[in-house]
Amino acid sequence: MTEPNEAVAARSTAEYRALDAAHHIHPFSDMGALNRAGSRVIVKADGVYLWDSDGNKVIDGMAGLWCVNVGYGR
């Protein structure tokens, strides 16, 4: 039997994008761009930085708006 974490790790970026499109609404996104390129799939985080499945490193700028009012690591 496959462990739950193994099954999740085995999914491809395309599978995650399909699941995202089927189950999530992105109210602050440019829907045209989102439909053309698909959603960004985050694969790693370290402090305020995130890495997507294409290898891009970005700052988690939305976290302060929504859920990290106290700060990282608390």
Image: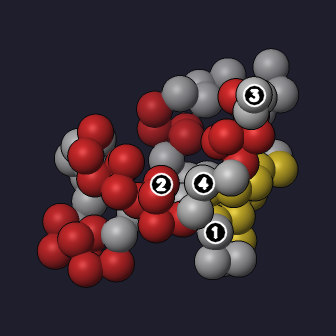
* Residue receiving disc 2: 16
* Residue receiving disc 3: 1
Q: Kindly report the distance in space between the C-alpha atoms of the residues bearing marks 1 and 3.
A: 27 Å
- Mark 4–mark 2 contact, CB under 8 Å? yes
* Residue receiving disc 4: 11
Sequence-first disc among 1 and 2: 2
* Residue receiving disc 1: 53
Where in the figure is residue 21, as x and y percent of width and height? 28, 53
* As drawn, 64 above or below 52: above
Where in the figure is residue 69, as x and y percent of width and height? 59, 26
* Circle 3: residue type: Met
Identify the residue at horizontal 71%, vertical 71% (top origin): 57
Dot 4 falls on a residue whose secondary structure is loop
- Mark 4–mark 3 contact, CB under 8 Å? no
Where in the figure is residue 16, as x and y percent of width and height? 47, 54
Q: Kindly report the distance in space between the C-alpha atoms of the residues bearing marks 3 and 2.
A: 22 Å
- Mark 1–mark 2 contact, CB under 8 Å? yes
Dot 1 falls on a residue whose secondary structure is loop
Where in the figure is residue 33, as x and y percent of width and height? 25, 76
